[in-house]
Amino acid sequence: MSSIRYALWSAAAGALIPVMGVLNARLGKTLGEPLHAPVVLFGVGFLACLLTAILFTGALPNWSKLSGARPIDFAGGLIVAFYVISVTWLAPSFGIANVILYAMVAQIVFSGFINHFGWFESLVQPMNGLRMFGIILLLAGLVITQIAQAKAS
């Protein structure tokens, strides 16, 4: 797959994150309890993942191979649960733009560290001056948006 396709796929996934946040917050309101919305979301997501796995691989995971995974390798489920619960809980009171902006900035900064140091056996991509400048611009953008919001309030 070409880099352009990866970029477009990544952009589409990213663009849907705030939509997911708003819809899940709305679902929580409909259910009368914000913490029930992620339960429904993960049920729907599980079914979607199950069908996708079967459609694209023709099989389900080989559950016997899970014994070879390290305990930390399962933390992704906890992390995505924390993220979804956080967005669902925070969006109605903090605003979806603020939730996503802070989350996105943190993702980019932390992913820079992960790639620079090769944490979690990731691809090593050393930080250079231009990347650091981009991150500084991103942080400046976060500060500017918060100043603008404070002035508008």
Image (spheres, rainbow, N blue to C red):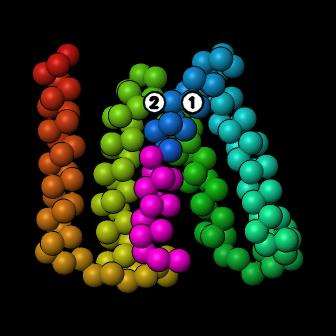
Q: In the displayed structure, would residue 28 be above or below residue 110?
A: above
Above/below status of 97 relative to 103: above
Q: Position of residue 107 (x, y in %)?
A: 38, 56
In the image, residue 110 sits, relative to residue 96, either above or below, namely: below
115 displayed left or right of 131? right
Residue 99 versus residue 78: which sits nearer the camera? 99
Badge 1: residue crowd in 10 Å (few <14, some 14–19, many ≥20): some
The chief SS type of the magenta part is: helix
Up-down: is 90 above or below 100?
A: above
User: In this rendering, would 57 be left or right of 152?
Assistant: right
How many labels sit on residues? Answer: 2
Looking at the rendering, the stretch of residues picked out in magenta corresponds to 1-15
Tag of residue 90: 2
Residue 55's disc is none
Whole-percent x, y for residue 8 in the image:
45, 61
Mark 2 belongs to which amino acid?
Leu
Q: Which residue is mark 1?
A: 23
First in sequence: mark 2 vs mark 1 = 1
Determine if the magenta segment contains residue 13: yes
Q: Amino acid at mark 1?
A: Leu
Q: Position of residue 55 (x, y in %)?
A: 80, 64
- Label 2 Cα neighbours within 10 Å, binned few <14 / some 14-19 / many ≥20: some
* Residue 68 as seen in the image, left or right of residue 80: right
**Residue at position x 67%, y 76% from top?**
70
Residue 66 in sight from this viewpoint: yes
Note whether residue 119 is visible: no
Say which residue appears at 32% left-offset and 69% top-offset: 112
Q: Nearer the viewer, mark 2 or mark 1?
A: 1
Q: Is residue 17 magenta?
A: no
